[in-house]
Amino acid sequence: MRTRRLALLSSASSVTALLFSLLANAAPLGAEIQVEREPSASDCPRGAELTRAVEHILQRSLGTANADDTLQVRVHFAANGDEYAAQVRSLSAKPGERALRDRGHGCSALGQAVSVAIALLLDKELEARAPEPPPAPKTPRSADGAEPDSATLEGRTQVELRESLAGGYAAGFVGPGSVLLAEQIGLRVRRRWVFDAGFNAVLPGTTAYDAGSVRNTLLFASLRACYTWGDSLSVGPCALLGLGRLRGVGIGYPQAQAQDLLWTAAGIGLIAQGPVWGRVFWSVSGEGWAPTRRSSFSVQNRGTAWESAVLAGAVSGQLGFRIW
């Protein structure tokens, strides 16, 4: 039995040593306890005893991390017969004072109450001193209210990959007027520059000539570069290049033939665009095209049945989706 008791005492001593080691290595609180005792209260705890008791309660060393910023706690013990009294004063930015009394045959109970009061006081003081966490940085939002998941912020380049479908009216490409359909994919850089490549189809237009007619179709690829102003609604000019195939088919003639011609053109335009919801956006554009050379289709022994216009134009509306 004695051997077991000695083992338990040894374990308790090891735990106590470990606690004191951790207590010594913890960051000091930066507080100092000063005690004054009247001769009648000589059995009340001294400053060192109160300091050890408070450190045991808080599980941290009081220490004096910074002499200019040390919390001063002063305790005054007095006794009158069997009645003991303690005045606890804190000298800090918000000074305070607390009085404790106890009636008994010694100052032990009052000393324990004072150590608890000081521990609570230091805990509140240190909590008040703790700096407030910095506010979380606000995430900038785009004009459509969505967070910019495709942008790198802080002045770096913002790039969006977008795709859109377009439909509109075209004049001067294959005849007086026809339907234009297009698909475009491109980039929007820093919410100002728009670069895209498109595939365009001008649906057949028919021109009557003599006893028959000529039906023309134009398929072409386009490159467009625009610079826009504005955020929610952006507007700006564009430069255009086009390359494609112009096809003519004779209808109603004794010898109906088809012919393909190379079509090249340059142009200028105007674009306006804005958000619809989330990643979806709308756009409208007007374009003017100038072919680099005139094209024509002739009917054998009958003359020129159709000749391209000097200028062509188109007005279209697009609905697009931002991929990233």
Image: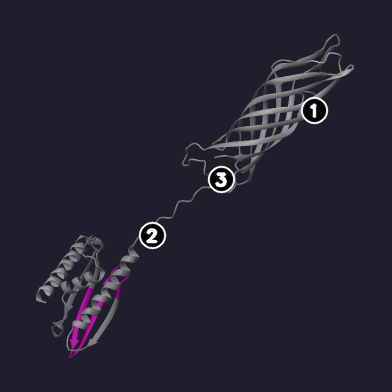
Where is mark 1, residue-wise? 177
Q: Residue furthest front?
A: 1
Inter-mark Cα distance, 3 to 2: 30 Å
* Residue at (70% x, 24% y) in the render: 219
**Disc with the residue nearer the chain's start (1 vs 2):** 2
The answer to whether residue 110 is magenta is no
Residue 302 lies in what quarter of the image?
top right
Q: Is residue 93 visible?
A: no
Nearer to the camera, 183 or 10: 10
The answer to whether residue 80 is magenta is yes
**Disc with the residue nearer the chain's start (1 vs 3):** 3
What is the three-letter code of the residue carrying label 2?
A: Glu
What is the three-letter code of the residue carrying label 3?
A: Ser
Q: Nearer the viewer, mark 1 or mark 3?
A: 1
Where is mark 2, residue-wise? 132
Nearer to the camera, 40 or 291: 291
Asked whether, in this view, residue 213 is left or right of residue 277, the answer is right
Where is mark 3, residue-wise? 142
Asked whether, in this view, residue 40 is left or right of residue 268, the answer is left
The vertical placement of 149 against 24, above or below, is above
* Residue at (13% x, 73% y) in the render: 4
Q: Which residues are magenta?
A: 74-96
Q: Position of residue 280 (x, y in %)?
A: 62, 43
Q: Is residue 167 visible?
A: yes
Please identify the quadrant where the N terminus is shown: bottom left
Q: Position of residue 99 (x, y in %)?
A: 27, 81
Asked whether, in this view, residue 248 is left or right of residue 124, the answer is right
Nearer to the camera, 200 or 150: 200
Inter-mark Cα distance, 1 to 2: 69 Å
**Secondary structure under badge 1?**
loop
